[in-house]
């Protein structure tokens, strides 16, 4: 169902329907806005400028866009690429071995985590700190899965890595988080 | 991460029944996977890892206000109108996007075809005291009574195997005249579009026809045709057939569908047998008098407390529930 709506919207938009485009904009702007803030480490100015330019680009090139069945991962990966380009420009840095990992430093704040967690040991206050100790890659994958609600396939498309790698990152990330959470609980009780 | 382990975590997190276990919904699924873990202790860690992946992290989503979104849209429109130049996309770039998209779609469609082609078995299970409604892929509606298992293969969705009790409301397929078949240990029921009840408990299968017509193929080779109101009981093990031409109170046969068992001047002994089937308990009569007491009325299938209280009142007995055994004594 969702993909049929996406497909019709995309087709209408491609033929120049501004109303269709505004629907797309109003749905995806807040999602990409939040994602942009996460990746750019809360740089509002950079995120919003980039987002506007991004949508402009999509609109201008609408006739040449591919036929899509699923808009969300496409928008996420394209936006990620363009934001990343802008971040590189603004930092004016070169010569990193793993450039990506260096730039993208995601940080979660305490307000972003619900107090009520399904995994019981995640309920403690220190969970944000432990979450931020994970690798950038793991943090981004966890964000895309549990905040942006992307499927593992979609995340693989967005990060341009394979399904198995995404699954690994999620699996290991959650497992690590659990181990750290249990350890910190243990230490608390000793003290 | 070993490859075989990886493959399994993928299966688990995509399995709807496993997801139910992780979220503690659907009792039948919870029991199934708890048992699976007991039967496969080496997979216990894997199951709990998969559960963690399913439960994940709960984020508090800060949504941008409607106002901010509208403001940015207005900004966008302004910028759009300000643009006077329309960039022309070079021909080769256009082709590149199209080629990538075509390759992606091709890959997706191949993968989809491969996944759908594999014939998998679908299983529906109910626990004691649980009644569920199922809609089969062909549109047939089934009500599955407690402690029952219904299964079919993806490539033969009108061939159902049943252990327990279910009521079928079969979708007629006039264009293909596709048969609908229910298989139990004792017999096969062949239908063309009909509603009927199949009860397969212990070593007997009982079929009650509400509407339409049915052909029964008993496992001893005999074929029986049924018309509405007929009740046939057959046990392959005992090779015994019992037929009733026209059941006087058909609604009593399928009262469980409404979540209650209805008794009309039934002995407490026979009533308790039906209750045993629904709740998975054993009855112990402490005196002869209580066994032969006649009761009339309805008791719920999904609430043991109320069921016991109702019977106590109706039959003037006291029932004590100890370790899943019901001890009955006349007041």
Image: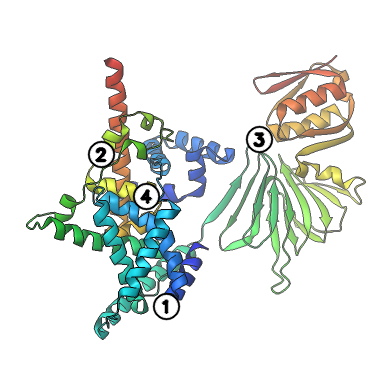
**Which percent across, then down, holds residue A86?**
20, 61
Looking at the picture, does residue B38 appear above or below residue A41? above
At numbered mark 4, what does the secondary structure look like: helix, strand or loop? helix
Nearest to viewer (mark 1 / mark 2): 1
Residue A145 is marked as 4
Looking at the picture, does residue B215 appear above or below residue A109? below
Tell which subunit mark 2 falls on. Answer: A
Give me the C-alpha separation between circle 2 and circle 3: 46 Å
At numbered mark 3, what does the secondary structure look like: helix, strand or loop? loop
Question: Which quarter shows the C terminus of chain B?
Answer: top right
**Which percent across, then down, holds residue B282?**
71, 26
- Do the residues at discs 4 and 2 belong to one chain? yes
- Do the residues at discs 3 and 4 belong to one chain? no
Viewer-side residue, B75 vs A161: B75
Q: Which residue is mark 2?
A: A132
Residue B128 is marked as 3
Nearest to viewer (mark 2 / mark 3): 2
Give me the C-alpha separation between circle 1 and circle 3: 58 Å
Give me the C-alpha separation between circle 3 and circle 4: 36 Å
Query: Residue at the spot x=69%, y=22% of the render?
Result: B325
Residue B103 in sight in this render: no
Q: Quadrant of residue B279?
A: top right
Q: Which residue is mark 1?
A: A16
Nearest to viewer (mark 4 / mark 1): 1
Give me the C-alpha separation between circle 1 and circle 2: 43 Å
Nearest to viewer (mark 4 / mark 2): 2
B173 displayed left or right of A103? right
Nearest to viewer (mark 3 / mark 4): 4
Neighbour class for label 3 at 10 Å: few (<14), some, many (≥20)? Answer: some
In the image as oriented, which residue stretches furthest toward the bottom?
A: B91
Query: Residue at the spot x=82%, y=61% of the render?
Result: B213
Tell which subunit mark 3 falls on. Answer: B
């Amino acid at each position: 169902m969702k993909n049929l709506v996406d497909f019709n919207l995309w087709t209408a938009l491609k033929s120049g329907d501004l109303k269709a485009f505004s629907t797309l904009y109003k749905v995806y702007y807040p999602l990409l806005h939040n994602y942009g803030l996460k990746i750019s480490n809360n740089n509002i100015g950079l995120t919003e400028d980039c987002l506007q330019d991004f949508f402009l680009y999509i609109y201008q090139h609408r006739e040449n866009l591919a036929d899509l069945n699923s808009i969300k991962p496409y928008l996420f990966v394209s936006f990620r690429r363009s934001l990343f380009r802008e971040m590189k420009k603004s930092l004016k840095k070169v010569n990193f071995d793993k450039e990506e990992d260096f730039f993208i430093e995601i940080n979660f704040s305490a307000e972003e985590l619900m107090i009520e967690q399904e995994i019981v040991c995640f309920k403690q206050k220190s969970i944000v700190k432990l979450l931020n100790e994970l690798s950038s890659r793991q943090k981004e994958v966890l964000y895309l899965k549990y905040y942006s609600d992307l499927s593992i396939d979609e995340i693989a498309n967005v990060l341009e890595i394979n399904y198995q790698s995404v699954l690994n990152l999620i699996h290991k990330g959650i497992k690590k988080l659990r181990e750290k959470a249990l350890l910190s609980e243990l230490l608390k009780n000793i003290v | 991460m070993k490859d075989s382990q990886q493959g399994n975590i993928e299966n688990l997190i995509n399995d709807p029944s496993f997801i139910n276990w992780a979220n503690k919904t659907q009792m039948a699924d919870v029991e199934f996977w708890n048992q699976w873990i007991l039967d496969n202790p080496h997979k216990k860690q894997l199951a709990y890892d998969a559960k963690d992946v399913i439960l994940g992290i709960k984020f508090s989503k800060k949504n941008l206000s409607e106002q901010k979104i509208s403001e940015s849209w207005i900004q966008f429109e302004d910028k759009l109108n300000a643009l006077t130049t329309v960039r022309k996309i070079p021909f080769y770039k256009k082709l590149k996007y199209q080629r990538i998209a075509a390759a992606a779609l091709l890959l997706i469609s191949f993968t989809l075809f491969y996944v759908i082609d594999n014939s998998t078995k679908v299983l529906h299970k109910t626990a004691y005291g649980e009644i569920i409604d199922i809609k089969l892929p062909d549109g047939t509606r089934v009500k599955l009574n407690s402690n029952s298992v219904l299964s079919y293969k993806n490539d033969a969705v009108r061939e159902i195997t049943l252990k327990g009790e279910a009521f079928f409301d079969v979708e007629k397929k006039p264009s293909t005249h596709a048969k609908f078949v229910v298989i139990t240990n004792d017999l096969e029921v062949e239908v063309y579009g009909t509603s009927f009840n199949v009860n397969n408990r212990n070593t007997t299968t009982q079929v009650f026809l509400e509407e339409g017509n049915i052909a029964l193929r008993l496992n001893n080779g005999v074929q029986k045709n049924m018309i509405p109101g007929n009740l046939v009981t057959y046990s392959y093990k005992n090779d015994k057939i019992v037929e009733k031409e026209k059941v006087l109170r058909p609604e009593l046969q399928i009262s469980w569908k409404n979540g209650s068992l209805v008794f009309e001047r039934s002995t407490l002994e026979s009533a308790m047998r039906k209750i045993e089937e629904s709740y998975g308990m054993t009855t112990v009569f402490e005196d002869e008098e209580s066994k032969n007491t006649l009761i009339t009325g309805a008791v719920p299938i999904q609430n043991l407390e109320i069921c016991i209280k109702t019977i106590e009142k109706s039959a003037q007995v006291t029932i004590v529930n100890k370790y899943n055994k019901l001890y009955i004594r006349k007041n």
